[in-house]
Image: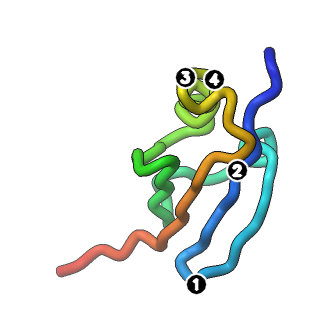
Amino acid sequence: MSKLPKMKIIKWNGEEVIQEIEDWKSFPFAIDDLVMVEGQEIYSYDELVEMASKEPFKNQEFLDVRVMPFIAGG
């Protein structure tokens, strides 16, 4: 597999972290957090890899990732 872009993760509290996509193999998608990658909701590691492998994202140095807590209302 060709090299995937890194992720620039911006958490809900404003903290920024740079990580490799491979670091998210065990991330619990859709449990407690909403994950937005380049403005699109992502629900699994496989979705993340698929997106990062395609144009226009595969040649970017970084993907913009936003992680926000999932808050259910009632």
* Residue 7 image label: 2
Q: What residue do we see at 53% from left, 62% from top?
A: 66
Instruction: Tell me the residue that label 3 is attached to.
Output: 55
N-terminal of the pair, mark 1 or mark 2, is: 2
- The Cα atoms of the two marked residues, 1 and 4, are separated by 28 Å
Tell how many labels. Answer: 4
- Find out whether the residues at labels 1 and 2 contact each other: C-beta distance under 8 Å: no
Q: What residue do we see at 48% from left, 70% from top?
A: 68
- The Cα atoms of the two marked residues, 1 and 3, are separated by 30 Å
- How packed mark 3 is, by other alpha carbons closer than 10 Å (few <14, some 14-19, many 20 or more), is few
Measuring from the top left, give residue 29's x and y in whole percent: 54, 51
Measuring from the top left, give residue 21's x and y in whole percent: 74, 42
Front position in the image: 10 or 67: 10
- How packed mark 4 is, by other alpha carbons closer than 10 Å (few <14, some 14-19, many 20 or more), is some
Q: Is residue 26 visible?
A: no
N-terminal of the pair, mark 2 or mark 4, is: 2
N-terminal of the pair, mark 1 or mark 4, is: 1
- The N terminus lies in quadrant: top right
For label 2, the SS is strand
Amino acid on which disc 4 is placed: Ser
- The Cα atoms of the two marked residues, 2 and 4, are separated by 13 Å
- Find out whether the residues at labels 1 and 3 contact each other: C-beta distance under 8 Å: no
- In the rendered view, does 32 fall on the left or right side of 6? left
- The Cα atoms of the two marked residues, 3 and 4, are separated by 7 Å
Measuring from the top left, give residue 6's x and y in whole percent: 76, 45
Amino acid on which disc 3 is placed: Glu
Q: Is residue 7 above or below residue 34?
A: above
* Residue 13 image label: 1
Instruction: Tell me the residue that label 4 is attached to.
Output: 53
- In the rendered view, does 29 fall on the left or right side of 27? left
Front position in the image: 63 or 44: 63
